[in-house]
């Protein structure tokens, strides 16, 4: 929980960012010192296979009470890692940040100033993006899907990790125990007041993006099936539409065989086979979609932890948290 003495928590998920970590830590420390507020930096290692864990532990030893290391046992995904950081945070305001330095830590103060004005959620819009065309197109697709699924309050750039949250919104997010939650959209559903600020964007200093095309597709699928019943409703409408077309097609065949020869319909056997295959494909797609929903129900019903913290460094004693 937040304390009156601590104003700001910076939560940074880390996955195989060994080349970027020293510079990112140095710049984030400098940015926090410049704001003249009480703060903490929470580095959440999401199952890295390089030296990221060692660097995080070293930083927490060198800056006790200022840098907190949260080491997850394996790779649970970015949003689970952020949730682990939120659970560890104590600040009145929480800012999330990527570890790849594409979002400059020097921009954090813009979000904090808006949070202090009374906003619950502060998003950011990346200016002059340095990403590849593929990443920009993928980001636009995610933003479009989220805006379609979100009613009322929306953000321009859901793909930017640099975001700020008030403590009540953070607590509300932590009270949501479902698997695979999309934190930015979830936060917007709890926010009374939200705003966006323009921030600088830089090229990745080192390493490669951790979001492959398959992970982006999985994210889209999770967004679609995890936040809305719209696909099921569309599936119902589609089923009725196909049934209507089937009835119309049957009437046409019946009329044509009465007008012409009874063998007239036999010439369309392969067409009927084709239509049957389309219908069977649609059934399999529908079963797959229903399976996604049933799978999510199964995951939430089991109540397994969304992540498991092996240890927390940089505090007065080791801790373990399961969510």
Image (spheres, rainbow, N blue to C red):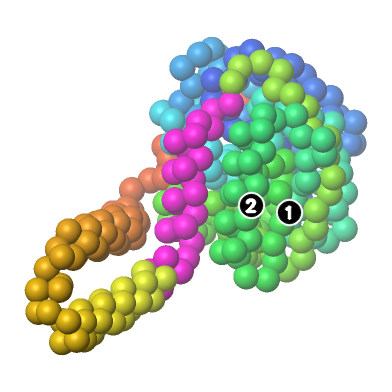
* Quarter assignment of residue 106: top right
Residue at point 66% right, 15% down?
Answer: 206
**Residue that badge 2 annotates:** 143
Residue indicated by mark 1: 156
Asked if 113 appears above or below 291 in the picture, the reply is above
219 is higher (above) or lower (below) than 298 = above
Residue 267, magenta (yes or no): no
Mark 1 → mark 2, Cα distance in angstroms: 7 Å
Extent of the magenta region: 209-233
Q: Which residue is at the front of the view, 192 or 89? A: 192
Q: Could you classify mark 2 by the number of other residues whose Cα lies within 10 Å: few (under 14), some (14-19), or many (20 or more)?
A: some
| Residue 264, label in figure | none
Furthest residue to the left?
263
- Residue found 60% across the figure and 45% down from its top: 86
SS assignment at label 2: helix
Give the x, y percent position of residue 309: 45, 34
Q: Earlier in the sequence, mark 1 or mark 2?
A: 2
Q: Are marks 1 and 2 in contact (CB under 8 Å)?
A: yes
Q: Nearer the viewer, residue 299 or 32?
A: 299
Residue 41 in picture, x, y percent from top left:
69, 32
Please tell me which residue is depicted at 59% across the width and 49% down the height of the picture.
142
| Secondary structure found at label 1 | loop
Please state if 76 lies on the left or on the right of 54 as rendered: left
- Please name the residue shown 31% across and 77% down the image: 245
Asked if one can make out residue 300 in the rendered structure from this viewpoint, the answer is: yes
Does 11 appear above or below 149? Answer: above
Residue 302 placed where, x, y %? 28, 54
Instruction: Name the one closer to the observer, 51 or 129.
Output: 129
Q: Residues within 10 Å of mark 1 (few under 14, many from 20)?
A: some
């Amino acid at each position: 929980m937040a304390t009156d003495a601590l104003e700001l928590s910076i939560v940074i998920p880390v996955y195989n960012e060994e080349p970027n970590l020293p510079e990112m830590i140095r710049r984030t420390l400098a940015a926090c010192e410049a704001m003249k507020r009480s703060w903490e930096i929470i580095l959440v290692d999401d199952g890295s296979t390089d030296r990221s864990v060692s660097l995080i532990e070293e930083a927490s030893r060198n800056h006790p009470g200022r840098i907190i290391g949260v080491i997850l046992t394996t790779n649970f995904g970015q949003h689970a890692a952020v949730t682990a950081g939120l659970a560890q945070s104590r600040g009145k305001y929480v800012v999330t940040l990527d570890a790849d330095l594409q979002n400059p830590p020097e921009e954090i103060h813009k979000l904090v100033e808006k949070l202090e004005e009374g906003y619950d959620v502060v998003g950011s819009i990346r200016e002059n993006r340095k990403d590849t065309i593929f990443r920009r197109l993928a980001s636009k697709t995610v933003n479009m899907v989220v805006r379609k699924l979100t009613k009322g309050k929306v953000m321009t750039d859901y793909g930017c990790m640099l975001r700020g949250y008030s403590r009540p919104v953070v607590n509300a997010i932590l009270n949501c125990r479902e698997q695979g939650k999309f934190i930015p959209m979830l936060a917007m559903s709890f926010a009374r007041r939200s705003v966006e600020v323009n921030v600088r964007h830089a090229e990745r200093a080192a390493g490669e993006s951790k979001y492959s095309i398959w992970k982006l597709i999985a994210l889209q699928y999770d967004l679609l099936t995890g936040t809305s019943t719209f696909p099921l409703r569309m599936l119902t409408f589609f089923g009725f539409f196909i049934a209507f077309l089937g009835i119309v097609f049957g009437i046409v065949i019946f009329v044509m065989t009465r007008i012409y020869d009874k063998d007239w319909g036999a010439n369309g056997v392969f067409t009927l086979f084709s239509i049957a295959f389309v219908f069977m494909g649609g059934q399999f797609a529908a079963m797959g979609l229903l399976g996604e929903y049933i799978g999510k129900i199964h995951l939430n019903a089991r109540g397994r932890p969304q992540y498991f913290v092996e240890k927390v460094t940089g505090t007065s004693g080791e801790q373990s948290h399961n969510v």
